[in-house]
Amino acid sequence: MHTLSALTKTLDRVYASRRISYEEALLLYAEADLIELGMAANARRQHLVPGNLVTYLIDRNVNYTNICVTDCQFCNFYALPGDTDKGYVLSKEELGRKIEEALALGATRILMQGGHHPDLPFDYYVDLVRWIHETYPQIEINAFSPSEIEHISTISGKSWEEVLTALKEAGLRGLPGGGGEILDDEIRKRVSPKKIRTDNWLGIMKVAHKLGLTTTATMVIGFREELTHRLNHLQRLRDTQDESLEKYGQGFNAFISWTVQIENTPLGRSRFRDEYGATAAEYLRHTAISRIFLDNIPTSRPPGPPKGSKWPRQPSTSGAMTSAPP
Ligand code: SF4
């Protein structure tokens, strides 16, 4: 049991805009009062972006295919190859219609993700991005989470960097942060044993940072994980961000977290189903801790950092935001 003074000391560090350690974050997560935690997180946010202005962009999520061979236990989206009732691969016409609908509503970006389709060749992905880029040059293309990049790399025999370079040349602007869930292999092996492992997820993001692609980091809670698993995830993100900012002058530009939804999934049918998920209060605690701990992910991205420069590194601030950059 920690003393009140240890808690107070840690909160003081937050208010003084100083980085907190893993152990301090664990203490706050486990023992701080929710309101106190929220106020401390907001103080960090105010330090980075004073005032109450919140920005957003309009984009559309498009899933180009739901065919997948990865069988994640929390997924009710995918269809196995050969499932002609549920499985689909969007045609360019269908995709174009969705993009036009989004443009008509003011969208400036599409976020495109899909299953791990075993039969789509490397050229399919490059051609798809090039076609969108040439047909709709006004829309920014964020596509293929690290797990898809790993899959494309596996089926093509190309390195992550070769895959990302080809996609970038075709018109890709960034990668969504999907497939992160909990970046701790103990949990990943249980809920998504065939999916990308932690080191590879982070490794692909580092290559994306090196190549100047826009990236976000995501997190899903509620897999019956411990607080330490959650903090392992946040620590790995913070370390990766430090490294990318140092080496490449850019890194993740947003952090987004949510709670797992298990309806109609294998987790929802398991004997532990009542233990999955997270309450609203737990989610708020998690958001506050993320905002405090991830002090190197900006809450908003300055428009176009000059080449080779670093984003403002305000050690006191936090980046746990659900908004995308303006
Ligand atoms: S990789 Fe994606 S689409 Fe495939 S099962 Fe997992 S979550 Fe679903």
Image (cartoon, helix red, strand yellow):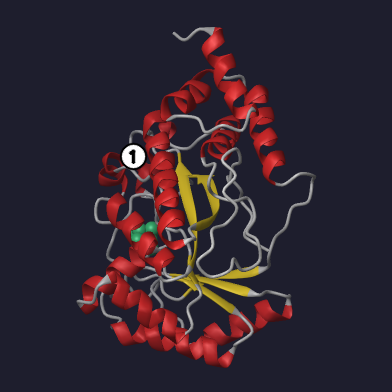
User: In terms of image quadrants, where is residue 228?
Assistant: top left
Name the residue: 35% across, 67% down: 148
* 212, 56: nearer the viewer: 212
Q: Is residue 41 left or right of residue 208?
A: right
Measuring from the top left, give residue 165's x and y in whole percent: 37, 78
Horizontally, residue 131 falls left or right of residue 103, namely left
Mark 1 surroundings within 10 Å by alpha-carbon count, few (fewer than 14), some (14 through 19), many (20 or more): few
Is 37 or 315 nearer to us in this picture? 315
**Residue at image coords 28%, 61%:** 70
Amino acid type indicated by mark 1: Ser
Mark 1, ligand 1, within 8 Å: the answer is no
Q: Quadrant of residue 80?
A: bottom left
Number of numbered discs: 1
Q: Residue furthest left?
A: 157
Task: Estimate the x, y position of residue 212 in percent, counting from the top left.
Answer: 46, 70
Residue under label 1: 270
Query: Dividing the image into 4 quarters, which one contains the C terminus?
Result: bottom right
- Seen in the picture, residue 192 relative to 102 is either above or below; the reply is above
From the top left corner, tell me how far across and down residue 41 is, in percent: 64, 34
In percent of the image, x 52 and y 13: which residue is there?
A: 6
The answer to whether residue 264 of the structure is visible from this angle is: no
Q: Quadrant of ligand 1?
A: bottom left
**Percent of width and height locating residue 245:** 46, 55
Q: Look at the picture and state if 181 lies above or below 301.
A: above
| Secondary-structure class at tag 1 | loop
In the rendered image of this protein, does residue 83 appear above or below residue 285? below
Q: Which residue is at the front of the view, 96 or 42?
A: 42
Q: Quadrant of the N terminus?
A: top left
